[in-house]
Amino acid sequence: MASRQGGPGNTESPRPGSTERRTASTTAPAGARRRTPQRTDSLPHRPDSPRAQAPGVDRPTGRTAEDPPVRDPVRYALTDHFRERLEQPGRYVSTRAVSDAIRRGQLRWNRTDGWRFALVDGGVRFVVVVGDTETNSPVVVTGWTEVADREAALETPRWDPVDIDTIAVRTALSESSSTPIPDRIRPRTVTRPFVVGDHRLETAPGEPFVRCTTCGCRFRSKDAITERGCRGGQTGR
């Protein structure tokens, strides 16, 4: 569902993916009769439900898929799908990056549905996918990073070579999830595990695969990673 907490906002959260809940006072004057709030949504709670709405956000009226999305990050709610990705090591997406992309990013129609904002900062492209035609408020659907300029990224203090190789490997795995990509993995060094599916993955120079640091399984494509659960401490291929 779209989280009922606030949108990306203007500042970085102390914990990735967390936002400050906006609340209203519930204290009533003495003698006042307490009113029971009426239920406005008859659907049961479901993850990523299109009926969810962030508090204080007006319902869009008459919007179509061709209408460009709003540029105010405060109006966006965060889906559970996106919040899970904020928690994942090696994804390099933050609420601040989302806000910057919505405000200043280049706007493109997304390949599947909705719109995407893309902003290059320090040699890395931050991509944020949003939607607002099937929800009661604008929502951030998902987000990821891509290496736009490797040399420029390595010249900034924000990134180190492991960060850039992690982004490159994750991008390569996602671009064609069913295709093995040993040649694109082989040159990379990823010593800080990143998460895909149930697995925490790393790779060393010359290895044509990524390896799960927990179960030891080796993978050459994203589908192979997501279709196999992690077996804990058991060693496998």
Image (cartoon, grey):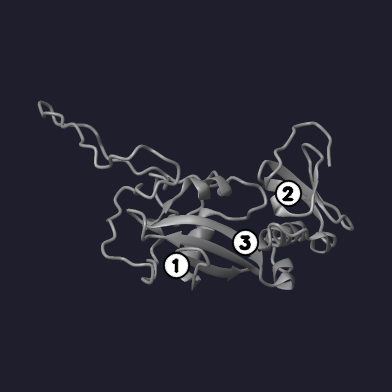
The answer to whether the residues at label 3 and label 1 have Cβ atoms under 8 Å apart is no
Question: Looking at the picture, which amino acid does disc 3 mark?
Answer: Thr
Name the residue nearer the viewer: 76 or 12. Answer: 76
Name the residue nearer the viewer: 77 or 229. Answer: 229
Measure how far apart labels 1 and 2 are at the Cα level: 37 Å
Figure quadrant of the C terminus:
top right
Q: Classify residue 14 as left or right of residue 210.
A: left
Name above or below for residue 216 compared with residue 75.
Answer: above
The answer to whether the residues at label 1 and label 2 have Cβ atoms under 8 Å apart is no
Measure how far apart labels 3 and 1 are at the Cα level: 17 Å
- The disc placed on residue 32 is none
Element type where label 2 sits in the image: helix
Coordinates of residue 5 in the picture (x, y in percent): 40, 45
Question: Is residue 71 in view?
Answer: yes
Measure how far apart labels 2 and 3 are at the Cα level: 22 Å
Q: Quadrant of residue 184?
A: bottom right
Name the residue nearer the viewer: 154 or 172. Answer: 172
Question: Looking at the picture, which amino acid does disc 2 mark?
Answer: Ala
Q: Classify residue 95 as left or right of residue 131.
A: right
Query: Can you identify the residue that label 2 sits on?
Result: 224
Coordinates of residue 115 in the picture (x, y in percent): 46, 66
Mark 1 crowdedness (10 Å alpha carbons): few <14, some 14-19, many ≥20: some
Q: Earlier in the sequence, mark 3 or mark 1?
A: 1
Coordinates of residue 33 in the picture (x, y in percent): 11, 28
Query: Can you identify the residue that label 3 sits on?
Result: 145
The mark lying in front, picked from 3 and 1, is 3
Q: Earlier in the sequence, mark 2 or mark 3?
A: 3
Name the residue nearer the viewer: 98 or 214. Answer: 214
Query: Can you identify the residue that label 1 sits on?
Result: 103
Question: Looking at the picture, which amino acid does disc 1 mark?
Answer: Arg
Please give the name of the residue rendered at 24% of the width and 34% of the height, measured from the top-left corner.
Answer: 26
Element type where label 1 sits in the image: helix
